[in-house]
Amino acid sequence: MSQAGQQRSPDTSVSLVAVEKYFGDVPAIRSLSIEVDSGEFVVLVGPSGCGKTTALRMIAGLEEPTSGEIHIGGHRVDDVEPADRNIAMVFQNYALYPHMSARQNLGFGLKMRKLPREEIDARVRRAAEVLGLAQLLDRRPAQLSGGQRQRVALGRALVREPSVFLFDEPLSNLDARLRVEMRAEIADLHRRLGTTMIFVTHDQVEAMTLGQRIAVLNEGALQQYAAPLRVYQEPANLFVATFIGTPTINTIEGQLATDAGRSVFRASDLTLAFPDAGYTGAAAIGVRPEGLELVNVGASDADLRSTVNRLEPLGNELLVYLDGPGERPWVARVNADSRCTPGELIGIRLDRRRIHLFGGEQQKRLATGTVA
Ligand SMILES: Nc1ncnc2c1ncn2[C@@H]1O[C@H](COP(=O)(O)OP(=O)(O)OP(=O)(O)O)[C@@H](O)[C@H]1O
Ligand SMILES: [Mg+2]
């Protein structure tokens, strides 16, 4: 029971239960089950065409699932009209009305819904306050900067006072600096409103910085649904490990055999033992750029060797791009004052605790960290 005078916050959770969507016989979403808690900020991330927009449009009611169930606030909404789902969606192409002022753009949807004039004015004022648009309400879109226009677009969703916000790549039309600024504003908006938000992006940095949990999709299938750090440190499979993190995780392919109760990975000169993964056959290891240490090429403890291709000094750290050691080039993230030069032969030592082992069905992560 809630205390007297205190209102229990309403259930604004969203859940998808085994939702599938086919366009003809092309599967866009394959048996997707996700639960978004009331007030949670969840990011759907994945490469182009993986089904992010389709998933969002089904939640909004703009697209009908082929099978499965969608619940909002604990109620099944499959038969509820989009307008009655109490959801607001912000799109990438936010298309403000060019001949209307910011104020009119903000209030337009409410006017269409025949809300009383005073109510519209009050909501527009509140949204403008929250988004820092109060001084700009009489300007037309052409008289606003890109960021201010995007804020008006957000405001249009805000004035509806929905229980769930859906964002479909709302920042992708902005330049890099504005993106970062608006990202912070959206995070701040979520903190202040506490509204359930589902945000779609193919930008993994955006996903990592915004989401309380992130759902990684590939080819319509959910790969992992967890907190950002968890996804980074304990990726469910090789796809997730590769998709999340910049620069990309370093990988090398080899074979896994069982030997004396351990799983032993071999790739040319490299031999690493992991706890028994119960699998033998083709496998790969992955080590993030910060898990590499560059040592003298002659060092006896070097695991691998390669040639320095180019350097990217970022001020606080140095990215060293290598030609190998395998088929694919690797990259090391090292101290800013490390010394090495392009063309130089170099030794690579792997941080044993940070080596991931992938193999088997869907290249699942079988282990992290080696054993002696
Ligand atoms: N109306 C449609 N008719 C047929 N196929 C569609 C339709 N809408 C989407 N698709 C297909 O469904 C798949 C998922 O599309 P969707 O737009 O959801 O991807 P996305 O993850 O949002 O991609 P992007 O990052 O490029 O926006 C794609 O293969 C796409 O071609
Ligand atoms: Mg899309």
Image (cartoon, grey):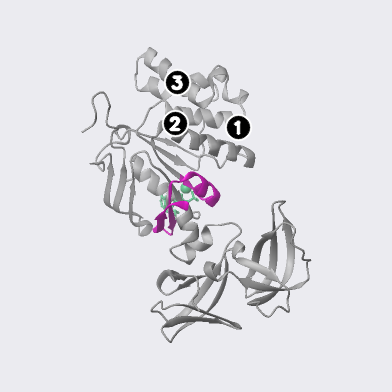
Q: Residues within 10 Å of mark 1 (few under 14, many from 20)?
A: some
Question: Left or right: where does residue 263 sit relative to residue 254?
Answer: left
The quadrant of the rendering that contains the N terminus is top left
Foreground of the two, 345 or 205: 345
Q: Name the residue nearer the viewer: 257 or 47.
A: 257
Neighbour class for label 3 at 10 Å: few (<14), some, many (≥20)?
some
Report the mark closest to the observer, 2 or 1: 2
Residue that numbered label 2 is attached to: 192
Q: Earlier in the sequence, mark 2 or mark 1?
A: 1
Q: Amino acid at mark 2?
A: Arg
Q: Name the residue beneath numbered marker 3.
A: 126
- Number of other residues with Cα within 10 Å of mark 2, as a class: few under 14, some 14 to 19, many 20 or more: few
What kind of element bears circle 3? helix
**Residue at mark 3 to residue at mark 2: CA–CA distance:** 13 Å
Magenta stretch: includes residue 322? no
Q: Residue furthest top?
A: 118
The alpha-carbon separation of the residues under discs 1 and 3 comes to 21 Å
Q: Residues in magenta?
A: 200-228
* Front-most of residues 265 and 95: 265
Please tell me whether mark 1 or mark 3 is closer to you in this view: 3
User: Picture coordinates of residue 286 (x, y %)?
Assistant: 54, 69
In the rendered image, residue 267, in percent from the top left (x then y), is placed at: 56, 81
Left or right: 323 as drawn, with respect to 358 = right
Classify residue 359 by image quadrant: bottom left
Is residue 209 rendered magenta in the image? Answer: yes
* Marker disc for residue 146: 1
Name the residue rendered at 45%, 71% in the picture.
367
Asked if residue 188 is positioned above or below residue 277 in the image, the reply reads above
C-alpha span from label 2 to label 1: 23 Å
